[in-house]
Image (cartoon, grey):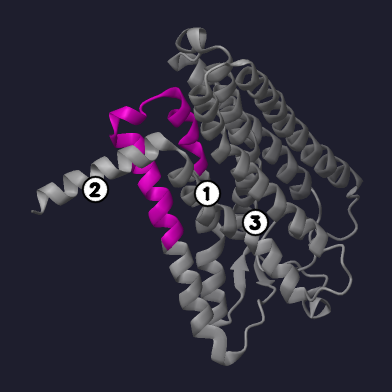
């Protein structure tokens, strides 16, 4: 299949790999995917709206958290609607600039999740380990700086990543996956030296992991020490519940990403299963994360119930 579209003439119109679906399953898959997408949009949209409108959530913790459902919305919107349309229409054609944009945003989403979770862990560390100094440390300037640092670092790293692949001469027109990524764009090249791309890609992945895991590990170890040294059991439970949602979110994201990596290392796995694993990275967290935060974050639950009560009173 790839050889059919791997020629010496690069075109701005690219052919992208198909997600193999039997004819009788096309519309069930489409409607299931559409429901998943709108469920994610609804749940993440509710959390964003609550943080924006409810004064009880106008706190540093939730200002930083705001970036997570926002990133989830961007990630799933960048991938799923186009994929579902391709499954129905079987066109599987997209333009090169659109492919670059999709790949850049998807990479931005992946890196953004790591840095946002690190920022949230830092906030919880200050709140639980230095409660008396929390408001003096987490000022609006500090909160804005933490958010800007997380997104600014992510954007800068991804710009360099895509600039490195943009310099390569292109002569192929087939994207080997069902969505665009940096590696898929690199594979359109012919004759260029991709050593720097490979090295930078590995360094970038390692840097994101080290920073995110390092900040979170330090924060949660310090929080655990503080909890164990605290005599009040209620305080321990509250501290653990505050961090639980973030720990589960990070574990889920790592499990999904690890599954994707393993899917490309296992020889017996089908190409369709590999594609499905890749799709999971941008669909499972955006669907599950708002449920996790709704269940394990007391302030969000209370704010949501208050809004429901107001709506009920309005219509009765």
Residue 51 picture location, percent across and down: 36, 36
Asked if one can make out residue 13 in the rendered structure from this viewpoint, the answer is yes
Residue at 77 percent across and 74 percent down: it is 271
Q: Quadrant of the N terminus?
A: bottom right
Q: CA distance from mark 2 to mark 3?
A: 32 Å
Label 2 vs 3, first from the N-terminus: 3
Tag nearer the camera, 3 or 1: 1
Residue marked by disc 3: 281
Q: Helix or strand or loop: what does disc 1 sit on? A: helix
Q: Nearer the viewer, residue 297 or 63?
A: 297
In the picture shown, does residue 282 fall above or below 237? below
Task: Give the magenta part as a residue range.
Answer: 39-68
Q: Position of residue 80 (x, y in %)?
A: 54, 64
Residue highlighted by disc 1: 289
Q: Are marks 2 and 1 in contact (CB under 8 Å)?
A: no
Residue 264 against residue 200 in the figure, above or below: below
- Is there a contact, CB below 8 Å, between mark 2 and mark 3? no
Q: Which of disc 1 and disc 2 is earlier in sequence? A: 1
How packed mark 3 is, by other alpha carbons closer than 10 Å (few <14, some 14-19, many 20 or more), is many
Residue, x 46% and y 57% (percent of image)? 40
């Amino acid at each position: 299949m790839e050889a059919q579209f791997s020629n010496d003439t690069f075109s701005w119109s690219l052919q992208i790999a198909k997600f193999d679906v039997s004819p009788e399953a096309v519309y069930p898959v489409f409607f299931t995917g559409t429901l998943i997408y709108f469920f994610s949009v609804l749940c993440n949209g509710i959390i964003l709206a609550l943080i924006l409108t409810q004064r009880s959530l106008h706190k540093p913790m939730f200002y930083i958290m705001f970036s997570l459902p926002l990133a989830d919305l961007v990630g799933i919107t960048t991938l799923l609607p186009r994929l579902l349309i391709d499954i129905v229409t079987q066109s599987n054609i997209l333009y090169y600039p659109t492919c670059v944009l999709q790949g850049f945003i998807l990479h931005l989403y992946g890196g953004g999740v790591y840095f946002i979770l690190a920022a949230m862990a830092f906030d919880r560390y200050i709140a639980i380990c230095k409660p008396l100094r929390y408001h003096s440390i987490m000022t609006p300037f500090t909160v804005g700086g933490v958010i800007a640092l997380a997104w600014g670092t992510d954007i800068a790293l991804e710009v360099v990543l895509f600039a490195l692949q943009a310099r390569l001469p292109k002569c192929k027109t087939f994207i080997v996956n069902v969505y665009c990524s940096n590696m898929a764009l690199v594979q359109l090249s012919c004759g260029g030296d991709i050593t720097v791309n490979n090295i930078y890609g590995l360094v970038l992945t390692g840097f994101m992991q080290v920073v995110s895991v390092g900040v979170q590990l330090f924060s949660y170890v310090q929080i655990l020490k503080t909890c164990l040294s605290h005599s009040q059991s209620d305080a321990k439970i509250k501290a653990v519940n505050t961090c639980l949602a973030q720990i589960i979110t990070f574990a889920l994201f790592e499990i999904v990403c690890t599954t994707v990596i393993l899917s490309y290392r296992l020889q017996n796995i089908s190409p369709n299963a590999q594609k499905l694993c890749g799709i999971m990275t941008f669909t499972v967290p955006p669907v599950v994360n708002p449920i996790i935060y709704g269940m394990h974050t007391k302030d969000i639950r209370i704010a949501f119930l208050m809004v429901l009560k107001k709506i009920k009173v309005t219509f009765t």
